[in-house]
Image (spheres, rainbow, N blue to C red):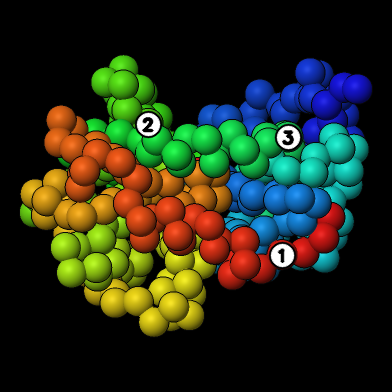
Amino acid sequence: MSRIAYVNGRYVRHAEAAVHIEDRGYQFADGVYEVCEVWRGQIVDERRHGDRLERSLRELSIRMPMTRAALSQVMREVLRRNRVRSGFVYLQVTRGVARRDHFFPSPDTPPALVVTARNVAPETGDRGAETGVGVITVPENRWDRVDIKTVGLLPNVLAKQKAKEAGAKEAWFVDADGFVTEGGSTNAWIVTKDNTLVTRPAEHGILKGITRQVVLDMIARNGLSFDERPFTVKEAKEAKEAFITAASTLVMPVVRIDDTAIGNGYPGELSRELRQQFHDVSEMDPV
Ligand code: PDD
């Protein structure tokens, strides 16, 4: 069975799927995206991903390519055509195709929409979570609108590649004051020695992760101690536990920051528990 992608109104073979060379996403990174987890035949937190997509587009004055309901249908169709039960659905909206010019194209230029999906067995992430991951720290070098989920990810790509070359899975950006902002494609968390969960406020300097929001819901539900504030690299290295969150990783324990083992060097209890509860608390809609 060949993979199928949705590209601007058509379902096409993934291997042959293409956008125009003057798509503004290609030329200017002038577009936004979302990644939703698909778990056992259900889309996870579709409503919140849809809300964030609309917000990102609004911030950049790009139109929604179609209604939320129609978009939801396209996502489902792509999932069905690819027989995805568990994995991910990716969608990307750009300002469309127009002759290269920094100014916005004429308002009647339709935004471009691409949707892809792929199967990933849930056990793949679960196996990784059993050992946890390492992170490295890198200076924050991104623009100050990282709250918008744009496809302009070059600093993230370079930071994550550096992490990979150092034998780690993620890079944590550190701001000029020594505080961790977030990972290249994840939000960052620690658990202090007195079992307080700490993560940076989402108003500024980070993407407001949907997975982060589900963890906040779990914290409220379980009556856990929580402090929404920035934390330094030093504090993180001395923490009892650390973890990262994203649709692509869920709650993933961090066992090493640079060369420092976190806690006893194994995934922490709270991180493991939050991972386990995740799909009981996130919103689910059948494909
Ligand atoms: N990344 N921060 C950044 C910079 C991200 O790119 C992401 C998600 C997150 C977590 O957001 P959420 O919990 O909504 O997935 C935080 C996606 C998965 C990606 O780029 O593949």
Q: Is residue 88 left or right of residue 73?
A: left
| Residue on which disc 3 sits | 119
Q: If the image is split into quadrants, where does the N terminus sit?
A: top right
| Residue on which disc 2 sits | 169
Which amino acid is tagged 1?
Answer: Met
Looking at the image, is mark 3 or mark 2 earlier in the sequence?
3
In space, the residues marked 1 and 3 are separated at their CA atoms by 17 Å
Q: Position of residue 10 (x, y in %)?
A: 89, 37
Secondary structure of the residue carrying numbered label 2: loop
Quarter of image, res 248? top right
Secondary structure of the residue carrying numbered label 3: strand
Q: Is residue 31 left or right of residue 154?
A: right
Secondary structure of the residue carrying numbered label 1: strand
Q: Position of residue 277 (x, y in %)?
A: 54, 63
The reply to whether the residue tagged 3 has its Cβ within 8 angstroms of ligand 1 is no
Looking at the image, is mark 1 or mark 2 earlier in the sequence?
2
Which amino acid is tagged 2?
Answer: Lys
